[in-house]
Amino acid sequence: MGSLKGKDILHGNQFSRQEIDAIIRNAAFFEKELKTKDSLTLLRGKILATLFFEPSTRTRLSFETAMQRLGGGVVSMASAESSSAAKGESVADTARTVSQYADVIVIRHPRMGSAQEAADAAPVPVINAGDGAGQHPTQALLDIYTIRKELGSLKDLTVAMVGDLKNGRTVHALVELLSLFEAQLYFVSPDALRMPEEITSHLRQKGIEIVETEDLMKAASESDLLYMTRIQKERFPELSEYERVKGSYVINGEFLNRLKKKMTILHPLPRVDEISPEVDTYPGAAYFRQVRNGVYVRMVLLAMVLGKR
Ligand code: NCD
């Protein structure tokens, strides 16, 4: 193993089945370890730098938690305004600079392709924590770990992805991973927010069955899993366009009653109004368990790229 040693993590399509199996296995191991220990020593002396040019709660804090649980240290840049980006420094120069301090870099940036630029410039591993409407591979891996835990298997699944499929980077990465397990996919969105054509055609080429629809109830009744997403307000050039599609799909108690079957519900969070708080106590509502899984999966990824797993 150790195939991720020294590598960047940039895109959902870079993983093999074997690598995903290894990530799941190791995440389960770390999850078990943390039941009896507060922290481990695997990455003692190593330093993670988190560079966040866009808002984040879960991704940044879970990476920092993961590093500290492994005994490593963290240096952090929590906003673009507080860094030299505000003075006009390029992503490449920032990444090259930070690699003089840290052994691994996690970056989130509003521009698609920015994580690749950072990776090209930095001699240390760079992990993409979201590049605009592009990719968010570590979220997709923690989603896969969560699905495996909640449903017991990744085989023969029918998954409905709901909401802003055009701008949602989590679904862009997750479909790549699900395609390795031959999932059937429902893409549920308003017409203006459909999954980008290059992604659907590439999935179809791989033999993945896709149904695109605006009908959430129909897709949900035929799926094992609902993956809800937020309408990505910050990606709309005009607020009026956002106003037209916001609130398109809402899961609430009434929806679950009408559905009449048990359903697992995931959401990368943050939510706005697409899942009512009354759903939180529903047994299939897994989105806060999903948050916790992020720590274990990110522990694995940090350990792997640093050659310790
Ligand atoms: C997502 C993101 O930033 O892409 N959040 C996350 O990382 N959990 C989803 C979103 O912002 O809607």
Image (spheres, rainbow, N blue to C red):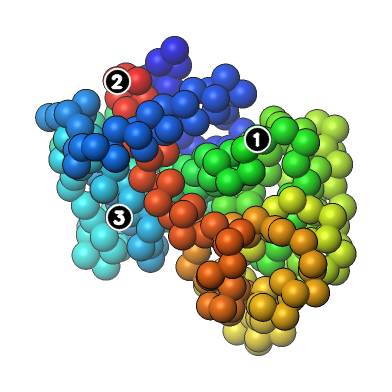
Front-most of residues 201 and 147: 147
> Considering only vertical position in the picture, is 101 above or below 23?
below
The quadrant of the image that shows the C terminus is top left
Front-most of residues 247 and 40: 40
Helix, strand or loop at mark 2: loop
> Considering only vertical position in the picture, is 115 above or below 83?
above
Give the total of numbered labels: 3
Query: Which-is-in-front pick, marks 3 and 1?
Result: 1
Front-most of residues 103 and 183: 183
C-alpha gap between disc 2 and disc 1? 27 Å
Q: Looking at the picture, how far across and down is residue 307, in whole percent?
A: 32, 19
Count neighbours of disc 3 (C-alpha within 10 A) and say few if under 14, some if 14 to 19, many if 20 or more: some
Left or right? Give the position of 128 relative to 208. left
The tag on residue 61 is 3
At x 35% / y 63%, what residue is drawn? 57
The tag on residue 110 is none
Q: Does the image show residue 236?
A: no
Circle nearer the N terminus (3, 1): 3
Q: Which amino acid does label 3 sit on?
A: Leu
C-alpha gap between disc 3 and disc 2? 22 Å
Q: Looking at the picture, how far across and down is residue 70, in whole percent?
A: 23, 35
Circle nearer the N terminus (2, 1): 1
Q: For mark 2, what is the residue?
A: 308
Count neighbours of disc 2 (C-alpha within 10 A) and say few if under 14, some if 14 to 19, many if 20 or more: some
- Would you say the residues marked 3 and 2 are in contact, meaning their CB atoms lie under 8 Å apart? no
Q: For mark 1, what is the residue?
A: 153
Circle nearer the N terminus (3, 2): 3
At x 86% / y 41%, what residue is drawn? 209
Q: What residue type is labelled 1?
A: Ser
> Considering only vertical position in the picture, is 130 above or below 56?
above
Q: Which amino acid does label 2 sit on?
A: Lys
Q: Does the image show residue 207?
A: yes
